[in-house]
Amino acid sequence: MKYPSQAVSKLYFTAAIGLFAGQILFGLIMGLQYVIGDFLFPAIPFNVARMVHTNLLIVWILFGFMGAGYYLVPEESERELYSPKLAKILFWVFLVAGALTILGYLLVPYAELARLTGNDLLATMGREFLEQPLITKVGIVVVCLGFLFNLTMTMLGGRKTSISLIMLMGLWGLALFFLFSFVNPDNLVKDKFWWWWVVHLWVEGVWELILGAMLAFVLIKVTGVDREVIEKWLYVIIAFTLMTGIIGTGHHYFWIGTPEYWQVWGSVFSAMEPIPFFMMTVFAFNMVNRRKREHPNKVATLWAMGTGVMAFLGAGVWGFLHTLAPVNYYTHGTQITAAHGHMAFYGAYAMVVLTMISYTMPLMRGREANSNKAQVVEMWSFWLMTIAMVFITLFLTGAGILQVWLQRYSSTPMSFMATQDQVMVFYWLREITGLVFLLGFMLYVASFFIKGETKAA
């Protein structure tokens, strides 16, 4: 760690890991509710567990991005963070607001929560992933603006690099596209049209810029490859990301009442979306093969390479499987969508945040890398979580294929609930694999508390 103010990232990364634990817990609860319908009912109904699970995902990833920004931008700018005090204040505001929102979901009926939090003034609640009360959404905007002000002032006062510029471009895009969460037309078609401007243009647009910048930063540090080489790769990846991701929004417009030309544009450009992820995989492996140094933090290198592979599989391959309009006609809203979502979020965003934490946490604790024993435990966590997620994805894909066949494609289609009974075995297997994922996560956390020596590479 070059600058003391970078230590503020530790707060954000610690909160991210804590919220990730909550997300996994509610994922396991939901998994059991798939097979034991009245599990924890009425204390935690399925719709509430799902809302908490997805909201925790978004919030912990945002905490991870913020922590990464507070570490990456000062180092790239070669100066201290503009205001560490502002960063700490915004951390507590965001954490308390997030915690109160989750408690609101769990303890207050949703309609009552909407009434208490001013939804009558500006109706923004009730939409998937954007269930947050109005005051929480306003709080997110305030926190993001303060965060971006802090990082922008840091960069403007120091060195400007491609990595920090792309990181800030992605973060500013994240904040700007979130403003569409306040757009809630009465017309359902228009509502869905603008809703995807947050949901898609986040995860298949500006978040990919943040992912690319974080991955490039870690690869420079652990490989010693010339910055110019890495930046050239980064420019090409980002160009393809923006071209395919923005127009590829159309693959969400197939069946919501928008003009039919979106079936062509959405199919063509979303079919190209795996290209930047494939390039990211080649990029990661190429940089590691060309490395000029053996960094003692070998597990951070493993996470970086794994991010490229799993992002390509989850976001690229599994996204492509059901993105063409003639295929999506049958698969839309089935467990195939859930399979893609799980591996894509884990591979692209969860793994890159874990990569950043794995690389920076030892530095913020005064050493270049964790002990060899700790790294072995963390490598076990990497393989357990990653293999578990692969099997979760495969089991959900199996459930989705059977669901499509029985419920939608067959000449004698079954009802939704009768179909669910037929795919129950996949849900049980998914739940068991989820427990393996939890074990891997626990080892990841434990690895940071294991002491020992780090042998020189």
Image (tube, rainbow, N blue to C red):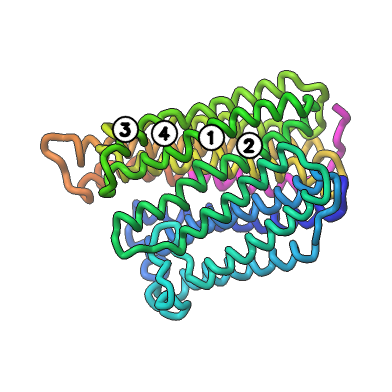
* Few, some or many residues within 10 Å of mark 2 (<14, 14–19, 20+): many
Is residue 60 visible in the rendered structure shown here? yes
Q: Is residue 125 above or below residue 278?
A: below
Assign a secondary structure to mark 1.
helix
Q: Separation of disc 3 and disc 4 at Cα? A: 10 Å
User: Gap between marks 1 and 2, in whole Å?
Assistant: 10 Å
Identify residue type, mark 3. Answer: Val
Q: Which residue is mark 3?
A: 264
**Which residue does the image show at 70% across and 42% down from the upper left?**
165
N-terminal of the pair, mark 1 or mark 4, is 1
Inter-mark Cα distance, 3 to 2: 28 Å
Find the magenta span and give its range. Answer: 434-457
**At numbered mark 2, what does the secondary structure look like: helix, strand or loop?**
helix
Which mark lies nearer to you, 3 or 2?
3
- Specify the quadrant that holds the C terminus: top right
Q: Residues within 10 Å of mark 4 (few under 14, many from 20)?
A: many
Residue 212's label in the rendered image is 2
Residue 363 seen from this side: no
- What kind of residue is marked 2? Gly
Q: Is residue 271 left or right of residue 353?
A: left
Q: Which residue is mark 4?
A: 270
Q: Which residue is mark 1?
A: 241
Q: Counting residues from the N terminus, which is met first, the one under dot 3 or under dot 2?
A: 2
Q: Earlier in the sequence, mark 3 or mark 4?
A: 3
